[in-house]
Amino acid sequence: MKRSHLLALAMILCMAFPAMSFAETIVKVGNILPLSGPSASVGQQGKQAREMAIEEINAAGGIKSLGGAKIEMLYADSKSDPNVGVTEAERFINTEKVHVITGAWNSGVTYPSTAVAERYGIPYIVPVSVRDTITERGFKNVFRIAAKDSWWTRDQFTFLKDMQAEFGEELKTVAFVYENGDWGTGFAAQWKKLIEGSGLKVVLDEPYSSSATDLTPLVNKIRRARPDVLLLVSNAADAILLTNTLADYKVSPKVILGSGGGHADPTFLSGCGDNARYIFDIVEWEADVNKPGAKEANEKYRAKYGTNLTGEAVDAYVAMYMLADALERAGSLEPAALRKALAETDLKSGPGMIVTYDAIKFDASGQNENAALSIVQINDLGKGLERITVWPKGARRAGYTPVFPMPKK
Amino acid sequence: MTQQNFKRNCLIAATLAAFALPLVVRSATYLHILIILYLYAYMTTTWNLVGGFAGVLPLGHAVFVGIGAYTSTVLWLQYGVTPWIGMLAGGVLAGAVGFLIGKPTLKMRGAYFALSTMAFVEGIRVMVENIDMLGPFNLNGPRGLNIPPLAHGEVNFWAFQFATKEPYYYIILTMLVGVLFLTWAISRSKMGFYLKGGGEEPDAAQALGVNVARYKVMAMVLSSFLTAMAGTFLAQLTLFIYPKSVLTLDLSFELAFIALIGGRGSIAGPIIGALLLRPVTEFSRIYFSSTLPGLHLIILGVVLIVVMLFQPRGLTEPLTNFFNSIARRFDASAREERK
Amino acid sequence: MDLVFIAQDCINGVLMGLIYGLVALGLTLIFGVLKVINFAHGSFLMVGMYVAYWAVTLSGLHPYLALVIIVPAMFLFGYWIQNLLIRPIFIAEKNVREPITVIIVTTGLWYVLDNLALLVFGPDYRALAPNPLKGQMLEFGEIFISVPKLYGAIATLATAGGLYLFLQRTRLGRAVRATSLDREAASLMGIGQWKIFNIAFGIGTAVAGISGAVLTPFYNVYPTVGIPFDIKSFVIVVLGGLGSIWGALVGGVIVGLIESVGPNFMASTWTEGIVYALFLLVLFVKPSGLFGQKQDW
């Protein structure tokens, strides 16, 4: 009895062993994200999008030029703390021996963790972290998918100009209202540069704290400044609170334009309900984009995780396909070869290429030079509130006329 | 070997082992984790000068970490002053701020002191987040300061940047040993006795004519100065600082946690606290954070609660008793030999 | 500066300030009796908000009617927490009147509760589905008054008044006051110290639950929602005087007014700094706060 057990065990071991000794190569990807603390929500979305992409890539046979190598994902919680980001980058590179790192959403964590990767020569893919300076430090191993903040703000102003021309409505005054973190103040600095020659006059320039318990004082300030345009940068909880308070106090500028982030959070629509109607928001991607595969990817994501893909989640999703493409071309896990392949990226098609623009291509600084933005309007067309692409005009949802300016409340 | 000798030899052996450790631990990850561990042990030891010996609970020591980090970084970025000098400058500035904070607050008792130090760290964070320029100094508001990493060939001692982890390891270890020695010297000095007396029996000390308040302020100034030096080290290690990383309540609280877990007011407390708490923090985050978000902080919370409930004076006491029982055995065997 | 604007800001400041006072009320009550600061108070508020959120969402009750579920649930929760976690510290540190260990234990509790909420409910920001209070405003020309805040302010006054009557007029209330003045003497008079501590902690937690019900109609619920209120409450109770019921309300209104009127003269982010500066000033000049008793510091 016992002997037969042993025999069986030995046989299993014998069968298992050869398989193990020819174990496939594994590509290890370390991901640094804020999984706890106030930014946990966006961290989770980034993680889910990455997971979905990697499952698809692995199911489709992995990286063929590496003998069908599978991609293994490792996640680390940065807690939005730069010091933790550095520790995790060191661990990923030295202990886990990852081949590539991605992250870190918070610009404050991306700065120092990319510096670590740069020192070791390990490629670091930044799906989202928008501060210009991230790709302006002469690093060779940093590749950013998302647009940088000077592009976001530039497109916001172009949008305002285009809409005035299209609808013959003149906008005269603008209020800048932004969270007082690195993201919001970074955007505000760009806005102040762009205001020259835009024909707009700044009537309010107001930072606020994302953790403020009451935004009524801020809303009253906006109400008294009577701006035509309200430009916002908000995180999730404050975007909801601000939108509801604006509606309570019947503040109705002609245009409210968000900057993604909190306004793009999946809970924004349910938290604000009808108060969110007619708000414009700048995003990198929207579920109604006219691109093959986009609808399917969004449906799949929603079935899996219960929310629509956000622009930031799509950046993470696409980043994984971009990485798979680079690995395929590199045919090697050598950092130098992989870096070269990433730098030469010119990804135009294939599954996962659901972004609005035609190709992912990096300039010398590692910035995705094609990263494009679009602007959506939140409206209810009879099927509940949804986000409808309106700008650029070529990408506008067929048959939709933007409501511009916002009707008075 | 007598008990005294045994203890001294153990201490020397431990110090030598710590200095020799990088010869065995080659992994940069573990060296980095050790560097952070020593850094926290260092900051907690300096915290202990006030929180342990002066018998109050400071919950705002991140102010001094921030002052140290910002001073040296601004001096380096704007004037090219080596962070080594920046470290001292930050220390002096922090000492002055420590004096201004300590003078009125150290008279308060218990909860009031704790809350006022919290208000200081929050107030200074708000200030830094709201100003880009402080006079000629560019603090860059909430966006923080990036220290450009130098290329391999350019790193040097004066730039306080190194290509490998070992120099950071030896710098912080030296700082830690130094500050431990200083604490030991103080605890045996008149100041140490007065502080301890003032912490435990403030009225009695006052009655004996000891100006406890003066010694407390002195301890605060010294603690601020030394804590700020850790701020410079942290800035040079991370190469990026912003208000939400160095001027936070989280950091201030963590120092108090380590001290209380280890045992307030004992020299070994911060070391033991850091040795126990840092690995719990780091490894529970590494192993649980991706699958069960938040579990690592639950574990930290449970550890804090359990230790405080069962060993409210910290873990140094039971560990010392255990150590002493071993030492006594050596003592006994030594006596045996002499016979 | 238009006077109408100032009037509008004052009204909002007073209403919101009273709600801050309500949050701080639980903290000050616990301090008054146990002489310890409960650092997990913000997390109790968070728990209260989740309880309110689920009670309203599942039962469809009016948020204020849901109080019949929230208050007992939170009372028992607080009663149990003090019995389980705080009492052993008092037993271990018999000679210390204000054990500092409690700060660490309650901070540990804060970490546990906040992250348990993250683990169980996820990081989502939840808002009550349309409820009878959401977005209701009273309008008098230029002046707008938020109805949920007005209700909240009334609930605050009612709670504070109820607590005052309880402490002054009932036998149990007198026992609570006796214990807060002198534990040993009270227990010599046959008042069970632990039972009083449990009850005081339970009431403090129940008040956090009431704050939760007041806030949920116009506020989001998420795991770290307690933290900004936590720090604000510390400031408020010290301004008003630790342990004083009316002090908490006055402290709350002061903070509310600074936050609301201040932005007329500066960026709103600076008002937070003004609050801390005032807090430190009060501590230096009159450490017992505006209404606190001298012995408490």
Image (spheres, grey):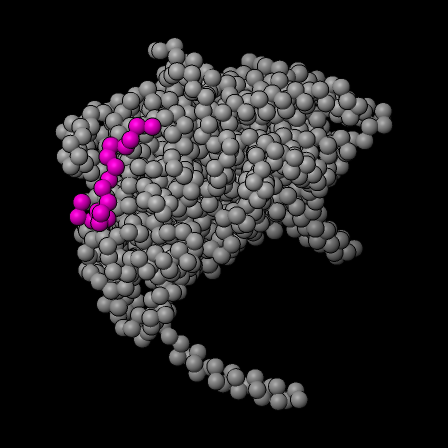
Q: Which residues are magenta?
A: A393-409
Left or right, residue A140 beside residue C211: left
Taking A268 as reference, is A31 above or below it?
below
Residue A146 seen anywhere in this rendered image of the structure: yes
Taking depth in this image into account, of C124 and B215 the one nearest to the observer is C124
Please count the marks in the image.
0
Indicate the quadrant where residue B265 lies: top right
Q: Which quadrant does the N terminus of chain A fall into?
A: bottom right
Asked which quadrant contains residue B183, the reply is: top right
**SS assignment for the magenta stretch, majority:** loop
Q: Residue furthest front?
A: A382
Q: Position of residue B186 (x, y in %)?
A: 58, 32
Give the quarter of the figure containing the C terminus of chain A. top left
| Location of residue C62 in the rendering, given as x and y in whole percent from the top left corner | 57, 34
Q: Position of residue C254 (x, y in %)?
A: 51, 17
Using residue C87 as the reference point, say whether residue C212 is left or right of it: left
Identified at 41% across, 27% down, the residue is A248
Task: Residue at 61% x, 47% y: name it.
Answer: B303
Question: Could you tell me which residue is drawn at 24 percent across and 54 percent down?
Answer: A290
Q: Residue at x 50, y 30 (%)?
A: C133
The reply to whether residue A157 is in sight is no
Residue A120, given in percent of the width and then of the height, sits at 32, 56
Relative to residue A377, is residue B171 drawn left or right? right
Left or right: C241 in relation to A233: right
The vertical placement of B62 against B329, above or below, is above
Does residue A290 sit above or below A326 in this rendering? above
Asked if the magenta segment contains residue B141, the reply would be no
* Residue closer to the observer: A201 or B267: A201
The answer to if A402 sits in the magenta stretch is yes
